[in-house]
Image (cartoon, rainbow, N blue to C red):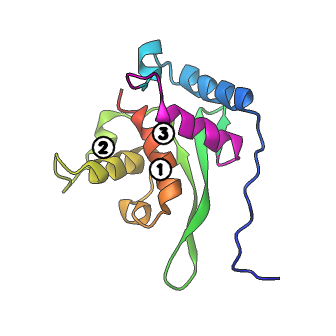
C-alpha cells in the first residue's frame, strides 16, 4: 500500500448538526446575534460556512463542558526531522486582553497575517512559529474561528 496517499476525508456530522454545534459554541461564548454574523452584502458568510464544514468533517469538536473548541489538524505540523509538534489546537472560549501582549510583540498594525497568528496564539497558547508551519487548509479554519474573537 502506498503510504504517500492521503485518506479521503469523510463527513461525520450532518450540516444541521454541525450548525447546532457552532451555535452552542456561540451560546457558550455569550455572543450577541450581531457578532455571530459575518455575512457579506449577498448574505454569504464564508467564515461560518468554513467552520460548519470543519465540524462536518470532524476537524472541529466543541466541548460543551469546558467551552473549548478543538481543531484536529488535517496535516500535523512536523519538525524537519519528521517529529510531530502540533496535531490539534484548543481554543479557549474567552481570553483576557493582556493575553495578547506577548503574541502581538513585533507585529505591525498593517500585518494582517501576523495579527491573525497573534490572536490564534493568544487563544490557543501555541507558539506563533508553529502556527506559521500549518497547512493552508488548517490555517484557513483557524482564521475563520479567530474572526469571532475579533467582535
Q: Is residue 54 magenta?
A: yes
Mark in the foreground, 1 or 3: 1
Q: Which residue range is magenta in the image?
A: 40-59
User: Which residue matches tag 2?
Assistant: 100
Kindly identify which residue carries mark 3.
145
Q: Which mark is residue 115?
A: none
Q: Could you say whether the residue bearing mark 1 is in a helix, strand or loop?
A: helix
Q: Of the two numbered discs 2 and 1 on the same chain, state the one appearing first in sequence.
A: 2
Label 1 crowd bin: few (<14), some (14–19), many (20+), radius 10 Å? some
In this orientation, does residue 94 appear?
yes
Q: Residue furthest bottom?
A: 81
Mark 2 → mark 1, Cα distance in angstroms:
20 Å
Towards the viewer: 116 or 95: 116
**Which residue in the protein does label 1 denote?**
140
Give me the residue at 83% from left, 82% from top: 1
Q: Most extreme residue toward the front, as rendered?
A: 42
Residue at image location 55% in from the left, 47% down from the top: 90
In percent of width and height, residue 8 lies at: 74, 61
Look at the numbered disc 2 and give the secondary structure of its residue. helix
Q: Earlier in the sequence, mark 1 or mark 3?
A: 1
Q: Disc 2 vs disc 1: Cβ atoms closer than 8 Å?
A: no
Real-space CA distance between mark 2 and mark 3, rounded to the nearest whole angstrom? 16 Å
- Residue 77 is situated, as x and y percent measured from the top left of the image, at 53, 68
Amino acid at each position: 500500500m502506498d503510504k504517500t496517499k492521503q485518506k479521503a476525508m469523510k463527513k461525520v456530522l450532518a450540516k444541521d448538526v454541525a450548525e447546532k454545534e457552532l451555535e452552542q459554541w456561540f451560546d457558550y461564548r455569550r455572543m450577541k446575534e450581531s457578532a455571530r454574523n459575518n455575512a457579506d452584502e449577498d448574505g454569504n458568510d464564508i467564515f461560518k460556512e468554513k467552520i460548519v464544514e470543519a465540524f462536518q468533517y470532524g476537524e472541529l469538536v466543541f466541548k460543551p463542558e469546558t467551552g473549548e473548541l478543538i481543531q484536529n489538524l488535517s496535516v500535523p505540523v512536523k519538525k524537519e526531522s519528521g517529529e510531530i509538534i502540533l496535531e490539534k489546537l484548543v481554543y479557549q472560549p474567552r481570553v483576557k486582553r493582556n493575553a495578547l501582549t506577548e503574541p502581538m510583540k513585533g507585529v505591525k498594525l498593517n500585518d494582517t497575517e501576523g495579527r491573525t497568528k497573534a490572536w490564534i496564539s493568544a487563544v490557543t497558547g501555541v507558539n506563533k512559529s508553529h502556527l506559521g508551519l500549518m497547512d493552508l487548509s488548517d490555517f484557513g479554519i483557524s482564521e475563520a474561528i479567530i474572526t469571532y474573537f475579533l467582535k
